[in-house]
Image (cartoon, rainbow, N blue to C red):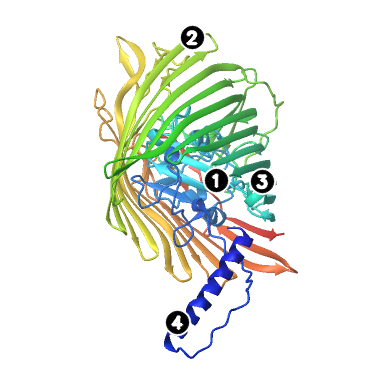
Amino acid sequence: MTKRKLMCAIALATAGSVWMGAASAAEKTETMDSYELAPVDVEGQRQAEPAEEEATMPGGFVSSKPSVGLLGSQDVMDVPLAVTEISHKTLETFATPTDGVNGALVLNPAVRVQTGHLYQDIAIRGFRINGHASYTNGIPGMFGQMNLPYYWVDRVSVIAGPNIGVSGAAINEAAAGTVNYISKRAESDAAQAKISYLGGKSVEEAVDVSNRFGKDDRYGVRITATNQNGETAVKHEKMDRQTLFVNLDRHTEKSTTNFLMGYVHTKQKAGPTRINFDFSPGHVTHLPRAPKLSRSYKPSWSYNAYDNVIMTLNHEQKLAEHLTAFFNAGYHHEDWYGYIDGSPKVVNDAGDFTISMEHYPLAFSRYYLNLGLKGDFKTGDLTHDYVLSLDQNWARSYGGTYRPFTWSGTGNIYRDNSWAQPDLPEKEAPYQRKTRLRGWHVVDTIKTADERTQVTLGLHGHNVRIVQASGARTDTSAISPMVAVSYKITPAVTGYAAHTESFGLGTMVATGKGYANQGDMLDPAKTKQNEIGVKVQGGNFLHTLSYFDIRQANSVDVMKSGLKYLQYDGEQRNKGAEWGFTGTLAEKWDLMGGITYLDARQSKTTNGANDGKRVDGLPYWSGALGLVYRPTTDWSLIARMNYIGDSVINRGQIAVPSHLLFDLGATYRTKMGTTPVTLSAMIYNVTGKDYWNPVAGQGTSLALGEPRTFTFSANFEI
């Protein structure tokens, strides 16, 4: 509503109420004189309501209408899947220097951090996923693999479990679940400048500027940029990163358009990843105690340098009252031109290790197109919301080891280590292959007249063609269904059940590893999940309790007539339960967190050798809790707890102890002159605990965690 129309409406309402009061009084007494009032102009400004996609549950940590892939935004109580969309408040409060945005995602009980620092991978319900398998504004494959910048991100949606039927076809399979990064849109005349101390000698400067203009604020532009440089809280690790993201959007009564363009340059030296172990006879016999997390176990000259260019386009056009067309496109180029890296391998119980460096440049260019229709119609008392969609991915991949460069050294994880720098090469990555993936989706969401029952039926299929540099070509295809049902027992209680699936490109049999079927492409292996759950919204709290059972086919070595083959045999079965919660405990206490029980085992192998064994790197119990206490309107006190239970590695023979971490911090809103300023301080890993972090499916390696780190920032609202 425009300001002029609002003024007229208020004036009419005021005059009407006066007239009605006068008429009522006239009924009580016929002797009272009547008067005609002069016109009255009243100026006012309507308080802006939050946009639908920004509406949050009590506490402000999660969206009340999360994004559900191709299905768009849906009420959290209606979605028949385990979906959590964390808000910008959650990112600002709980993202960490080491784990980045994943530090906030772990407040979702389905998510656990797998590695930090260099590779910021996560696991969803026990299956690993990296940045290449995530989505940006609903488009797959548009994010980097390694240390992930997030200042441009507004919200992050996570759908737990395989769900390709509602997420779109991706070259990197997201069998674990879907992580969708949603970019910041423009606000009216907003500008912020931020400077942050991130521990060690690392400092980051950032700016965030946005504006809306045109008729009814039709157009919007938002620009975010960051510059980080300096040694982190880990000795010798140095981060040099610059980012620039521009988000343009346009909305009319019949269309919405959003275009995101981003550039990221990163050079990270001596970034910690994992430490490997030699468990062969005569070497490591038990798990050594964890080393100091603030110490580096790589040469100070080792590094990863890469550039990412990202572009996404989303457009919706209303064709009729019940029909909308949509178009999505994406482009992602990653040039990982600098790679001089390797991981230590501990060779004995004393902590001695060997380390080798290799130069492995790689690059790729990815393209994505998606066309579809969505709308609704009725059959009797039932309402159908449908989606019909076609999409295609293209990719050209480059990569390979630069063989003339070799370097190796020795060290110990319980002392400082240093090595002389050799000549470091920089070579272009050789061409590897071309990939083309074509997919289709049919989804129908059926609602009863009273909207208490919702049934989602979907079918997805795609075919893949891979052409190697040698000219060898392989083609694979598969189809997977999905069905999900939710029922509102009461307005505040919803029960749901779902069967979802996912599958990827298939598995390429590696060359040079002694396989008789080397170079062959195994058919896509499906990951299937059955899930039941209940969502309860009581007072200012939302609880989600779910039970899931996931089965994923394994590729293993099989001997036939004295020859080794790689083929599918057996499966990994992850089953468990999750309890997630978020809301406001009292007027000043906001809370989010969850607990997960996970039983992950190998089963149904031909020889039965691994049947019933626990999957390496996966604890039975894990949980996280985030708390914000606001004693005044200006102060916020922050606390977080993260627990990872005991696990095993080396095929269950080596126990990995549990760990419990605490973070504490505070924010204070004040003014410098007339400029609002928010001051923030955090201490991560308050007790300075050194610990091993298990990695899903990794039997001979463990990740290094986050050392005690103090950070401070000042955010100026210009």
Distance in Å between CA atoms under marks 1 and 2? 50 Å
Going by the numbered disc 4, the residue's amino acid type is Ser
Question: In the rendered image, which residue does mark 2 sit on?
Answer: 472
Q: Earlier in the sequence, mark 4 or mark 2?
A: 4
In the rendering, at what x and y percent does residue 89 appear? 54, 56
Quadrant where the N terminus sits is bottom right
The residue at the point 66 percent across, 46 percent down is: 221
Cα distance, mark 4 to mark 1?
42 Å
Instruction: Inspect the image, locate mark 3, and give the three-letter code of the amino acid beneath it.
Output: Val
Label 2: state its secondary structure. loop
Q: Residue at x 32, y 34 (%)?
A: 482
Residue 133, labelled with which disc?
A: none
Q: Quadrant of residue 698?
A: top left
Looking at the rendered image, the quarter that the C terminus falls into is bottom right
Q: Does residue 586 sit above or below 35 in this rendering?
A: above
Assess disc 2: are there few (<14), some (14-19) or many (≥20) residues with their C-alpha within 10 Å of its C-alpha: few
Q: Secondary structure at mark 4?
A: helix
Say which residue appears at 54% left-offset and 16% top-offset: 433
600 relative position to 398: left or right: left
Under mark 1, the amino acid is: Glu
Look at discs 4 and 1 and give the one toward the viewer: 4
> Of discs 2 and 3, which sits in the foreground?
3
Give the labeled residue for mark 3. 221
Q: Secondary structure at mark 1?
A: loop
- Which is nearer the eye, 184 or 237? 184
Q: Position of residue 263 (x, y in %)?
A: 66, 37
Q: Nearer the viewer, residue 322 or 717?
A: 322
- The residue that disc 1 covers is 253
The numbered mark, 4 or 1, whose residue comes first in the sequence reads 4
**Labels 1 & 2 near each other (Cβ < 8 A):** no
Pointer 4: what residue?
24
**Displayed quadrant of residue 162:** top left
